[in-house]
Structures are given as C-alpha cells and as structure tokens.
Amino acid sequence: MGGTVTLPKQLYADALVEVRDDLEMKEYATENLLYSVRQGSEFPKDKKIDWDIKRPIPRGLKPYIISTHESDLAVLLPFENTETILKYCPVVESWSDLEKGINWQKKSPEKHVFLPRSMNGRWGWFRLWMKGRQPLNFWREGAGSAVDQPTLWQWLSHPKQANNFAAVLGAPVKHSFSPTYHKNYFLEAGIPFYAIHIEENEWEIAMPILNQLGLVAAAVTSPLKMKAGEYVNQSATNTLWKQNNTWLGANTDKVGALALLQDHLTKNCAVWGGGGVLDVLKSIMPEASYYSSREGKPRAESSEIMNPEVIIWGDPNNSISRVPKAWKPKTVIDLSYHDKSPARLYSLEVGASYISGLEMFVRQADEQQKIWK
C-alpha cells in the first residue's frame, strides 16, 4: 500500500503512520510510527520524529523530518547538508507558488518533500502525481488532516510512478465526469487522469508547468476552450494531445451537440448563453435566436424571439431572473449534465420538460478517446 496516513482512531500496519500531538492522538506501538511534534513537549524520542521548525530543536535530538508549513523556504536551508528529510507543506494559492515548490523538490528528490495545501483541495492531483517521487506522501482516511490528501481509493488506483498523465482542465472541474469516464481508458496505458482547476487568467503559467511535469492529453472545459484553441492556433478547442512533442487540438463538441439536439432542430428556438460551444451551436442551428445570459437580451447578430418552443441552456450560472418572463417553452435542453444546473430549476418553474446534457458529454467524450487513441 505504501504512503503515509495521519492516524485518527485505527492502525494500518502496512503504512507509515503519523501521530500528531496537537490532535490528542493515542500513541501506538509500531515500528512504522512517525510522531509529528506540533505543540507538546513530551514525545517518544525513540520514534521517527517530524519536528516543526517553528519550535527550537531540543539539544541532542536528530529529527527524522524537519517541517515547515509556512511559505518561506529559507528556514530549511541550514539543514540541507544533513541526512534529515525536509518537508515543505505551505498553503499554495497560485501556480507560481506551486512551481516554486516543484523546483525546490526537484533539487533533492531523495530528501525534499513538497506537499502543497489549499482550502478547496485543488492540488490533490499533484499529491497523487508525486506518488513514488519523494520519500513521504500522505493519503487520508475520511476527512484526513488536509483536503489535498488523496483518498485511499485514489491512492490505490493510481500507478506507483507514472511517466505521463492526462487531465480535464477548467474552472470548476470538481463536478466533471471526465476523470471517471476516461480513467480506465488511460490507466490501460499506465497513465492517470486528473481534474485540474485552472482559471482563465492562469493558463499562460499553468500550461508550461503541466507540460514540464508530463501532461500528454487533456479534455478542456469552460472557461478555457478559447485559450486551448489559441494554444494550438485554432478556434475553440476541447481536446488536446501531444504528438512528437507538439501540441495538437480538436473540438468534439459538435458531435456531442448533434447527438443531443438532433430531435429538436427547430426555428422556434432560443439559445441562452452558450460560452465555449456558441460557435458550434450556430453552425448547427443558424436560424435560432441567441441570447446573452449576462444581459438578458439578444446578441448583436441575433433577432429577438417572443416565445420559443425550445430553450437550449448554456449558462452554468443562475441567470434565471434575466430570462424574459413571457417565455413559456415546452422543452429545456441543458448543455450541462450537473444535478445543480439552474436549467433544471428553470424547467420546473415554467413547467417545461427537461433534457440533460449527459448524452452530449458521452458522445463527445467517446470522440475524444478516438482522437487520443
């Protein structure tokens, strides 16, 4: 099994176990005990000790690990020439800070441990990627002690040390079905698939980092499809792959959209929002009316519609209040497959039948796998 788990109540005999004295944990008799001293003065000196550098090291103590949970790496410099493992576990708020930690870890991978933390678990993919690449890696039991720690299932289903990885890129991505749908496809080649959160303004710094780490294929979702297109000199792109060290791109949204909309191609249709699939929808349904969900008005190039029979909902945000009150559609077709999509609520409010975008996702995802293959 490998890895390290912070011990809440149970003992896992085959893993290195951390006991933190500030979490009121019971001491367990095991050779694989890692005792992390955070605030107490009493600790078993015959065990492997993880010492927080914020506290003076007692005379004569040689910690197994010296840790810092702050952003300043300079506090670890005095211990670089010792045999002690150095653990850098800061709150990482940007890709620049992540790159800083990656570069530090690479300088001495046999003794440098980089464990980025966040409030929402956005670096969980990186924790998994580092499996087998540094002397200490944590998985969690239940809530664990950090949301970025992978679950035991994620840890066990991940290759011990992969050469490359694939991912879905976007913001947000936690709701995405892509990791589940593509997981086995890539694992057959020993490649893990992650969900990686990238804001639109982070693309330029995130992609070189991912490229250097080993990204070889990606599904791209909102709001990054235009950024991905620019990356490969194309229009909006939802599929990326590396071939002969060159990034190539394609868009499988049209295949998915046709599968979802083929029985509802009507002139009496309004498209609400649309985002990165707007151009695809226009190519399929040129006579539909296109509305800006931010303004609640027809787009400059589109005509107004009084009462559409079908609404294609392409806005992930709750913009129901801006939808024209006179509209009484019979059908709402959601481009999202998420259970909390506002299109579900809107269809209930107006008494319309609701069609999820799940079929669109499945069809375009199948097409992505054909391209990656």
Image (spheres, rainbow, N blue to C red):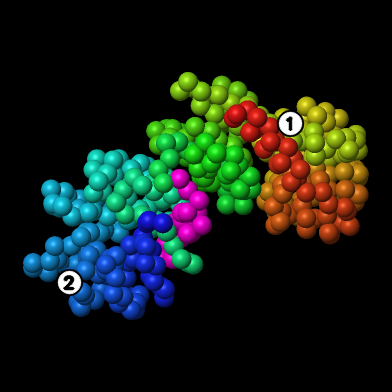
Query: Looking at numbered disc 1 in the image, what kind of residue is underneath it?
Result: Lys
Binning the other alpha carbons within 10 Å of mark 2 as few (below 14), some (14 to 19) or many (20 upward) gives few
Disc number placed over residue 254 in the picture, else none? 1
User: For mark 2, what is the residue?
Assistant: 45
Q: Please name the residue shown 52% across and 45% down the image.
A: 194
Measured as percent of width and height from the top left, residue 201 is found at 50, 39
Q: Which residues are magenta?
A: 144-159
The residue nearer to you, when weighing 323 against 362, is 362
Queried whether the magenta region covers residue 145, the answer comes back as: yes
Q: Image quarter for residue 41? A: bottom left
Label 2 element class = loop
What secondary structure predominates along the stretch shown in magenta? Answer: loop
Binning the other alpha carbons within 10 Å of mark 1 as few (below 14), some (14 to 19) or many (20 upward) gives some
Compared with 343, 163 (above or below) is above
Label 1 element class = helix
Compared with 252, 136 (above or below) is below
Measured as percent of width and height from the top left, residue 176 is found at 62, 48
Compared with 60, 215 (above or below) is above
Compared with 145, 311 (above or below) is above
Q: Image quarter for residue 68? A: bottom left
